[in-house]
Amino acid sequence: MSHSVENRFFAIVCGALLIFVAPLFILFLFLSSERAEKEIKDHITVLLVANAQALAKPLWDLDEDSVTQISATTVAEGAIVRVNVRDLSGQLDVTQSTIPKSYKGNLESVSRSIVYNGVDGAKKLGTITVYYPQLGLFDGLKNEEIVFISIFIFAVLTVFGAALIGNRIFVIQPLMRLTHAVEATRRLGSRHHVDWQSNDEMGRLASSFNDMQSKLQREETELKHAHRRATDTYNLTPAMLFSLDKDDCIAAVSDYWLAATGYNRAEVLGREFASLVLPDSRSQYVDRKRSHPDSAARLAVTVKFLCQDGRKMDVLILETTAVQDGLSLSVMTDVTELKQSEDRNLRQAITDHLTGLLNRQGFETALDAKINEADLRHRELACLFIDLDRFKWINDNMGHAAGDAALRELVSRLQARLTPGDVAARLGGDEFAILLLAEDAEARAMDMAARIAEVFDAPFCGDARLSASIGIAIYPRQAANAAELLLKSDIAMYAKKRDGKNGAQIFDNGMLDDSRRRAELESYIESGLSEDWFEAYLQPVVNIDDRSIVGFEALMRLHHPQKGILPPGRIIEVAEETGSIIRIGNRIMEKAIAHFARLSRLDGMQDSYIAINFSPLQFEPDLPVRIAALLSRYDISPRRIVIEITEAVLMDDNPETRMVINEICHYGCRIALDDFGTGYSSLSYINRFPVDIIKIDQSFIRAINDTASDVSARSRMLVESITTLSHKMSCTVIAEGVETEEECATLRTMGIDYGQGYLFHRPQHPDNLMKTLSGPQFDQLSPVAQAS
């Protein structure tokens, strides 16, 4: 091993000789052999020409002795070792040879024809063939060439030997000393120097090596001091420090780490750190490197750590990714209290503080998890969207404390009917949602809806009765994702509310069409408000006896630029659900009063009134002030304004609404009860509220002349009873929807005061109505109604 450099040098020199010198030597031998062979061939050619002429006459005479003598003379020539003379007729075949029997070499041959020139011309008599040994590379060398080659070989060997000796003295010996110094440093650990002094490259190398050894010795001394200081810092730092090797086994721990965890150093060194992590977070720790990019300067992971005495700590581990000598440095911090605080904050963030159920944020997270579970288990997921009916009545009449108590009682009853795995949440206000995972989710959902209905059998907060409208959607049968599932269950719930509330409704695609139409109407409503598409049409109210106009009812109409006038009933329904009915009502009220002010300037209209319909949502505290401002602007007496309300306003018995109605009455406006006789009609409303006008619903008016006598009799009895009692309570009675003369005659006999319907006048745009009323053909006292 110590002579490997010398051996390589020897191999390089030998290779150089083989590559450069040997080919030249071989070429020289080849050229010498070629030259000698050419000289032999030229000499033999001359002999053959002479002998062929000499053999012509003897061969013609078949003189075998002469032929033999000439052949012997030929073979005696130096290069020729064999001669063969052969007659073409085969009578003469003479061979002379000087080749010893032991000769094994190859022979070269040259032949020539023997021609006799006689009187008849030249005749070929036979052939003479001579043989000579094949020359080798060294056979053609002359003496002077051999001397030259000997001198050349001696010179090459001398140079070769001098190179080996020089390499041995000036290269190998200093390298041997340098190698011995390196091996001694490696074996003994001390820094050895090379004892070699020269001014060449090897001397400079030895000097540089000695300087390097001195510098390394100083650096090693400094490193030992630095390592001692680092070890002291590692152990005295008040932090849980530890180091891992490339296999994530513990290579070192600080004294503070041992004090905090209770372990001793001997039992943890070499142990996998993951074995000290609790199983529920062990995979998170093992996968920490895969979950972070390779370029991250450090890794951070929070896991549960098991102490020696069995205590469990939530620890944050910060680990360096830049390792040295295969080791990484990590610091472990006890975050148990912080984790508990975060868990409390998370629970508060996703939990409804009133009921303890999940809130909307928590429900959306649970919904995503349940959908993933449904996909993994190949099951269906039902979402029940629950909205309480008449819950607002409890808050308005019994107070919000009673409403909160009712919600807590409701949740208590619901939870008793849930099974493990079911998820319930309060989405806000009186809206709830339940998630059910099952193989047949629809059947499970309908069964749960029946159980929920049982919850409302008993009253809440004493005697308060509630019910619920429930919408059901199934994943993945009816929805492809969480948002779509929640939306479609919500759509199904609203469909149930529109169908009469109190029950469950499975989603179907027809509801999407309703939802789209509803969204279209909402768009039309917003566009109508912003672009002034809403108009207040007016329908006259007449005296049933002489058909003179006594007042007008303002009716909302939405005139779409492309679709024309849209049906008002659906628009009002959507507007009340979205809350835009307040803006629409205010717009219609302003326009109706403005139009009424114009009509009031016509002859005979000075004592008429205008009735304006109000939604329950419009009875805000500032409504009386708004009405007073409009009447003052147009100089109209409050007595000429009639506020039409429905039974829904009176049924809610909202104290705030009652206060607003009382203020309007005190201001001087009158109150009309619209559509009387439908729903939960009660004459007690007339006694409890300041009602001035009763409007009998058109369904009763149409039935008074029904072909079925019993229906007609009952309807007439009801209309007569309402009229009599209303008159006793000083209320004016108006019949709605009068369309035939027969109906008008019957109502007159019953004592009805006023009538309203297509028989008299249709609802008209105020401009058209102005033209009709101001035209010469209109006679207010005429018994014939003017229909338009």
Image: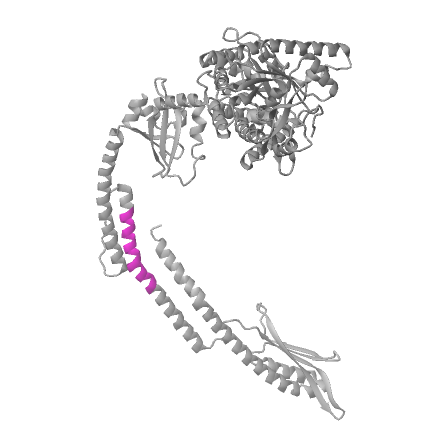
164 part of magenta stretch? yes
Q: Residue 220 appears at what percent x and percent y?
A: 24, 42
Q: Is 264 rendered above or below residue 57?
A: above
Residue 409 % position (x, y)? 50, 10
Q: Is residue 78 visible?
A: no
Given residues 300 and 515, the one toward you in this image is 515
Q: Quadrant of residue 442?
A: top right
Who is closer to the viewer here, 412 or 206? Answer: 412
Residue 521 in the image: state x and y as whole percent.
Answer: 60, 31
In terms of secondary structure, what is the magenta stretch mainly? helix
Q: Is residue 236 left or right of residue 56?
A: left
The answer to whether residue 361 is magenta is no
Q: Residue at x 41, y 25 (%)?
A: 275
Question: In this rendering, does residue 410 appear at all?
Answer: yes
The residue at the point 57 percent across, 11 percent down is 686
Q: Which image quarter: residue 743?
A: top right
Above or below: residue 59 compared with residue 491: below
Residue 111, quarter of the rendered image = bottom right
Question: Where 177 sits versus 718, above or below?
Answer: below
Q: How is the image coloured?
A: one colour
Q: Position of residue 150 (x, y in %)?
A: 40, 72
- The answer to whether 71 appears left or right of 304 in the picture is right
Foreground of the two, 787 or 257: 787
740 with respect to 176 (left or right): right
Outermost residue to the bottom = 119
Classify residue 159 as left or right of residue 395: left
| Number of numbered tags placed on the structure image | 0
User: The magenta stretch spans which residues?
Assistant: 162-182
For the point 70% across and 13% down, the residue is 749
